[in-house]
Image (cartoon, grey):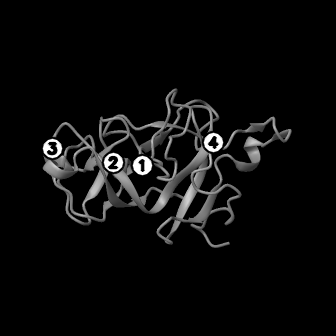
Amino acid sequence: MRSGQPSFSDCRWGPGVIITPTDTTRGITYSEAEFLGRRYWATGPDGKERIIKLVKNVSGATLLPCQALKYSTTAGRWGKDVTICADDTDPCCGVVESEYAGGVPTGKWFRMVQYGEHEVIMQTTSDARVTCAVGDPIVASADNGAVHKQNGTAANAAVQNRIGWMLQVTTNGTNNGLKASALIDVYQP
């Protein structure tokens, strides 16, 4: 395997499937060591390839589609547990896949997008930072998993806080609080 590729390629769970580690109906318990934190190539609903990672929601709330995420800082859980980005200095690790229409309850496993074309939620109290051109870098905002245009301030200009780049033009009057197309690029081999 070449450097930079996901550890293996076939994800047994499709888009939008909420994974319960213990399936009492079938008497199956999925091993965290075997699945959690693993990366896969997957095809999005648009037919384009993306890199996803299986992670666990430990935020204490239901995660919504397209929310920006960061890794939990709990010892021994880095790369496996995630919570919502809530500040523009949060280092993002991916976004909730858009196919989770009802959201992802806390304690459940799910697919997080780390690389590829995907929607993000554009929102911030500073409307001007919702206005983006194609190619503008984006970071998490302080608005519950939303993102906005990266500005030049020292706090959010750091590369590790960047979640990706915009793939469409957005304006503050039209797109604040709505989803927009972006290239998610936080995959690190």
Horizontal side of residue 29 vs 90, given as left or right: right
Q: Earlier in the sequence, mark 4 or mark 1?
A: 1
Horizontal side of residue 109 vs 21, given as left or right: left
Quadrant of the rendered image containing residue 11: bottom right
Residue 173 position, x and y percent, is 13, 48
**Circle 1/circle 2 CB separation < 8 Å:** yes
Which residue is identified by label 4?
Answer: 109
Q: Earlier in the sequence, mark 4 or mark 3?
A: 4
Which residue is identified by label 3?
Answer: 127
Which residue is identified by label 2?
Answer: 121
Residue type beneath disc 3? Asp
Spatial CA span between label 4 and label 1: 16 Å
Please tell me which residue is depicted at 49% across the width and 46% down the height of the picture.
101
How many marks do you count on the picture?
4
Residue type beneath disc 1? Cys
Which residue is identified by label 1?
Answer: 66
Q: Secondary structure at mark 1?
A: loop
